[in-house]
Amino acid sequence: MNIPNLIEGLVKNLIESSEIKYKAGDYKGAILDRIKAKNFSESEEKYLSLIKRLKVGRSKYNLIDDYRYFLNKTKKIKIIEKLNKASN
């Protein structure tokens, strides 16, 4: 086995570990594993390519999308409240 394959295997294991930790509610651990995986990758393109290859479909556990959804939902509620106050 050569070094690039070992590194790719390590990155793959860290990404999978990140998914498992996220599902278990260990969000900080999930983020730290992703950061480690990104640091081991040779380049941003290879890191993103590996993530895409590991995810055949869209993962239902996606920290960034969940956070964006929460922010959008919160903003939506605030806007509705402001509109209700303005209309009264």
Image (cartoon, helix red, strand yellow):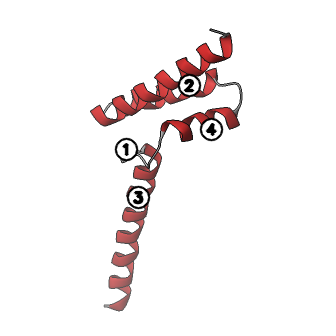
Kindly identify the amino acid type of the residue bearing the numbered disc 3. Tyr
Residue farthest to the top, as pictured: 1
Front of the two marks 3 and 1: 1
Q: Quadrant of residue 38?
A: top right
Q: Which mark is residue 61?
A: 1
Q: Looking at the image, tell me whether mark 2 or mark 4 is earlier in sequence order.
A: 2
Quadrant for the N terminus, please: top right
How far from the left and from the top, in percent, is residue 29?
A: 40, 26
Q: Nearer the viewer, residue 1 or 65?
A: 1
Image side of residue 22 versus residue 48, left or right: left
Considering the numbered disc 4 on the image, is that residue within a helix, a strand or a loop?
helix
Q: Looking at the image, tell me whether mark 3 or mark 1 is earlier in sequence order.
A: 1
Distance, label 4 to label 3, CA atoms, is 25 Å
For the residues bearing labels 1 and 2, Cβ distance under 8 angstroms: no
For the residues bearing labels 3 and 1, Cβ distance under 8 angstroms: no
In percent of the image, x 38 and y 56: which residue is there? 70
In percent of the image, x 65 and y 25: which residue is there? 41
Quadrant for the C terminus, please: bottom left
Kindly identify the amino acid type of the residue bearing the numbered disc 4. Ser
Q: Which residue is mark 3?
A: 69
Q: Which residue is mark 4?
A: 49
Considering the numbered disc 3 on the image, is that residue within a helix, a strand or a loop?
helix
